[in-house]
Image (cartoon, coloured by chain):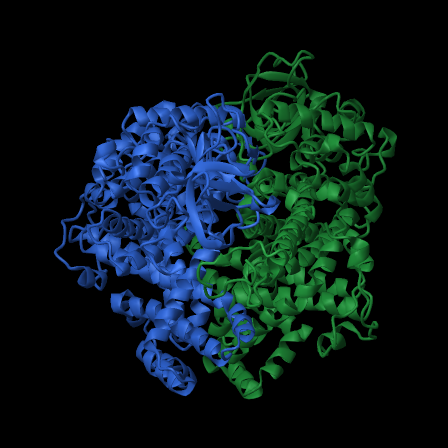
Chain colours: A green, B blue
Amino acid sequence: MVDTAAARITTTPARKSGTRASAAAPALDGPPSFDVDAVATMLLGRWADDRRTSRRLALDPALHRIDGLTVSAHRDRVFEQCRFLVEHGAIQRPFPTAFGGAENHGGNIASFEELTTADPSLQIKAGVQWGLFGSAVLHLGTERNHREFLPGIIDFTIPGCFAMTETGHGSDVQSIATTATYDPDTEQFVIHTPFRAAWKDYIGNAARDGRAAVVFAQLITRQRNHGVHAFYVPLRDDGGSFLPGVGGEDDGVKGGLNGIDNGRLHFDHVRVPRTNLLNRYGDVAEDGTYSSPIASPGRRFFTMLGTLVQGRVSLDGAAVVAQKLALQIALSYATERRQFPGPDGADTVLLDYGQHQRRLIPRLATVFAQSFAHEQLLRTFDDVFSGRADTPERREQLETEAAAFKSLSTWAALDTLQEAREACGGAGFLAENRLVGLRSDLDVYVTFEGDNTVLLQLVGKRLLTDFAAKAPKDAAATAKFVAAQVGTKLADASGVRALQQNVLDRGSTAHAVRDLQDPATQRSLLAERVDTMVAEIALALRAAGRDPQAQATAFNRHQHALIEAARAYAELLQWDAFTTALDDAPEGGTRQVLTWLRDLWALGRVEDHLAWYLMHNRLSSSRAQAVSAYIDRLVTRLRPLVPQLVATFGYEPGHVRAAIASGAEGVRQEEAASWFAAERAAGRLPEPEKKPKGQRPGR
Amino acid sequence: MVDTAAARITTTPARKSGTRASAAAPALDGPPSFDVDAVATMLLGRWADDRRTSRRLALDPALHRIDGLTVSAHRDRVFEQCRFLVEHGAIQRPFPTAFGGAENHGGNIASFEELTTADPSLQIKAGVQWGLFGSAVLHLGTERNHREFLPGIIDFTIPGCFAMTETGHGSDVQSIATTATYDPDTEQFVIHTPFRAAWKDYIGNAARDGRAAVVFAQLITRQRNHGVHAFYVPLRDDGGSFLPGVGGEDDGVKGGLNGIDNGRLHFDHVRVPRTNLLNRYGDVAEDGTYSSPIASPGRRFFTMLGTLVQGRVSLDGAAVVAQKLALQIALSYATERRQFPGPDGADTVLLDYGQHQRRLIPRLATVFAQSFAHEQLLRTFDDVFSGRADTPERREQLETEAAAFKSLSTWAALDTLQEAREACGGAGFLAENRLVGLRSDLDVYVTFEGDNTVLLQLVGKRLLTDFAAKAPKDAAATAKFVAAQVGTKLADASGVRALQQNVLDRGSTAHAVRDLQDPATQRSLLAERVDTMVAEIALALRAAGRDPQAQATAFNRHQHALIEAARAYAELLQWDAFTTALDDAPEGGTRQVLTWLRDLWALGRVEDHLAWYLMHNRLSSSRAQAVSAYIDRLVTRLRPLVPQLVATFGYEPGHVRAAIASGAEGVRQEEAASWFAAERAAGRLPEPEKKPKGQRPGR
């Protein structure tokens, strides 16, 4: 374990220097002073108190995952943990004060994320109950629905499901086939599953615990289909048996998150009262008349889906937490573990290997970028959900940020967990060291609550829409517009910029590096790539004409490129969030170190796409080489700061709970070294048969 | 399931064309004829009969993994499965005929690999017993050892361990601290664990089943340490209790492979007879005199380790099998599963999405490359282990190929299993669809039997040694030698080659693509990258001088680059294997299709490193763009051939056992479409409230 207090070093006096200035003045004599507590506070963010409360709760062994449980025992345990959360007032934050809540939306998500340290199954089971099932009633229902349904949801006497996805339709919610047909004679809705593909599937709480569900179905009244709406549908009696007409099956063992009982549900003409429609965005009168405050069915559908964005926000945060745990485990081990003798005969600490640094330190920079980006997303979310700034623009920003950040962070979590696991070798494969368990659980985060590929495509489509709004209408003018705006084709053809760089950098990587440290350079590299990619795709789509089939073919041909453009845009947003956060860092060494991390992260993104920058003449060959060279230098520079950087995460041994990050490895190494020293001193070490090359002295 | 017979199409007559000619003549009128059976036979390779036998055995439900078992029940099951293998004569192949074996080394590995389809735990548990424990006795022991120990190992009455790795030393076997000190008075070796870091760890069969172990320890006699040797050490009595002086603990739950009881072992002055030393490469006489047929302790150590290369060979093959299963599952599903309406109103088949093709089809090319490379490795292995061609050169080739291919294929397996799992969405996360289970099990393949990073570094060091053998001794001459050999610095500075390409390709991607199809172009792109990278690192190391500390620092700074160079070399070897295999393909359509796959794979590798090729002026910008454009074209061209390509793997439903690859999804889609058609015909489909854009007709 990293000792937060011990890790704070202040060997050099703090320097007075602004972000930009300090980034361009790397000539330091020793390691800069770095204020662990200040950065820890930055990372805790606006809802620091909620996070701290939740972290304290997460130290309770009752909430900790136990490896090797059967699926059934794990489900039992997580069910009880949910009760524990209710009893400790941990889930009430977002609900109305009338129901014992605090209407604290940001704090609610922040506190849930921290449960990831206890067991991701708990985070997700709680998310199903209060974040999806409860949240659907809260946001899609009216006060009538709240009074009737919320109390049992909040106190967990009614465990419930969010029954949206169908076996035949995952990401395409608009096409679900379950129907809710209004019968004016009885004033009931008839919920019905017409065929096997329309079974609800992968539904949390469906296999065992669910007493009720919010079921999404096509609302049909008076022979008209008004699109997808949500209905409150009782599922099981008090004994846990399905009610008449309801059926289902267990999804069985999953790749992770086995504390949650996912399953399938189907309905055979199940009748519910008219008032079980969650009727905030659409209602049916006794006589069957449909009404809605939103005239357009399309906009109504997306408004209803939009209330569910909080799932994505919460997964983004959980993915950040998991990365912090992974890096704390792998980096703690890497600073104690030794392997292969170095030139001095002593075994080398893993983190002193160039390859090991390259594997882990850039990922450390990533988690800082994603942490700051997540904090920004959380604020956007709270602004909208508190109603404080619930404007269409802010909602759109929320949806874009949630889709973009959730995609990148959940993929990054899998990548970092895997790299951490491999960096710990066989020890990383043991459940006691937690990396494999976290990875298994987080696996599905990349495809649930919005498949990352689909989410990035949505972001990409929004970029195309924005582009179309700005661009002229005819193709020739657009081409000129594009050339003027992003300078792509012209600059490409002449290679002017790359040539300029060659001239500027001639014989001097120092000049190139200075320029790469400049935030303006970094931002324009990231931004121009987005602009150019989007413009290129837009031009290609426009060239395909208006025929729907030709359009579809052209779109499909550029689908991969569009998703890459969206990824580039997400990275730009993360860069902005990171750079904005730097302003809150204490000036001097602390801000300097965070700026190095920002630079490392930004240049890592440029390095990922180096071929693009070269092919588009945005970087000369020598400038491109400077990118990798400077990354290497930053990694080396950050190496000694790793313990302090990890300490800023603020996790205690009770959160980390990995045997190899407990200090045990250091003790073992110490014991081994002492044994050899004592044996050597006593003259008991046998001589080697022949002193082989590189033999460590005294063995 | 893909029906092998149905998948074989012969719509166009076979064309007479050699590999090179056909690659350069892509103007085909329809899909080429493709002989599934012929390619299936190629993939089965030299040990087709052994593979077929093992595949038949693997259809037995007794060998199939059951998801959701407790660790203890899974261990029981796999233990019984090992008995089953003995009873069915499935494990005897490699042993001497005197012991009921067939001395069939290649066939043995090939047959073991196929057990991956049943349960990777079985492959690995069997691998521990017969591939490691048994193999150590076989290859490190003499006839005396064989007579005494092999029968119980072969018939599994003595389940055993291969106790090499220690908690404190994973990859660095030479530094293990367990000692075996000879006591001439009793003619015994005393096996001893001096401290906690020297406990044997991650040892299969150690936690529960192991009755004996081959223990690796520093052999000490007459006050001399003769380095690491292997000793046969009994562990437990018939009741399963540890013998006096032996102790250990369970490694507990792992990220996968939970059918194997990995654990830790330690020894407190445990005495074994002198004759329990496996004495092929080193022996101790009654009086304590040490002797060895290999004078150099270093060479002796590597010779002993070298006999263990078969583990790597077998993991390489298992990784190929797992990729085939993953792709068969994801691609079968992708050809049935529909999502989101296309322009014609009908939902689109997943594999018709550009992004989905880009995700899966290049990985299909990879598994063909790795399959052919593995077959080559297996032949090299059999040549050496049968003694038919056991030369130092061939042994070195074997070790290099095993390290290179095992690293790339095990990483590729994780990558492909994950991409397949994500491409199947939530369904991919269910254990019933097998992708998550296979991924969990194969996770550790990238770090056991040689950590991939360490293995690639070994390959890299060998490349440096080869370079040093060819290069002149002084730095200036070396620089010239490098420039002359790989043309790097000079070509870089002038950019002559890139300029030439620009002139040649001006206005014509056709010319660029034709050139990229040329095997000579592909090979030189891959080979020159290796040569240049190695030369650059060698120059940098030479510049660091002879001081060990400076050398170590320089080496460390280039460690990442060296590992990348080794990876590039491994890819070159794979390209060679793939290209050689093309000669065995039937001429005409079949060879054409395999050539497309080879091209797709080769250009994928170039695309991975496009920035390098641009920075080193090996490719012009326009040529680089042609690489990606031609990849896109190949992916589109291969799309309709996917069912046949998958059919060449030859796996039956009993091997695949994934619900989503069983045809069930197609049935569900069919049922849904029929329901809508019937409702529409009967006039029962309600009209939409307002026809939204893109609404599919009739819903």
A689 up-or-down from A138: above or below: below
Picture quadrant where residue B9 is located: top left
Question: Residue at the location (65% across, 79% down)?
Answer: A514
**On the rendered structure, is B343 left or right of A286?**
left
Q: Nearer the viewer, residue A28 or B529?
A: A28
Question: Residue at the location (65% across, 27% down)?
Answer: A161
**On the rendered structure, is B145 left or right of A199?**
left
The percent position of residue B315, horizontal first and vertical second, equals: 38, 45
Please indicate, yes or no, whether residue A474 appears anywhere in the rendered image. Answer: no
Q: Nearer the viewer, residue B509 or B406?
A: B406
The percent position of residue A583, horizontal first and vertical second, equals: 79, 66
**On the rendered structure, is B561 left or right of A633?**
left
Question: Residue at the location (18% across, 56% down)?
Answer: B583
The percent position of residue A109, horizontal first and vertical second, equals: 75, 42
Q: Nearer the viewer, residue A358 or B160?
A: B160
Please indicate, yes or no, whether residue B57 appears anywhere in the rendered image. Answer: yes
A408 up-or-down from B427: above or below: below
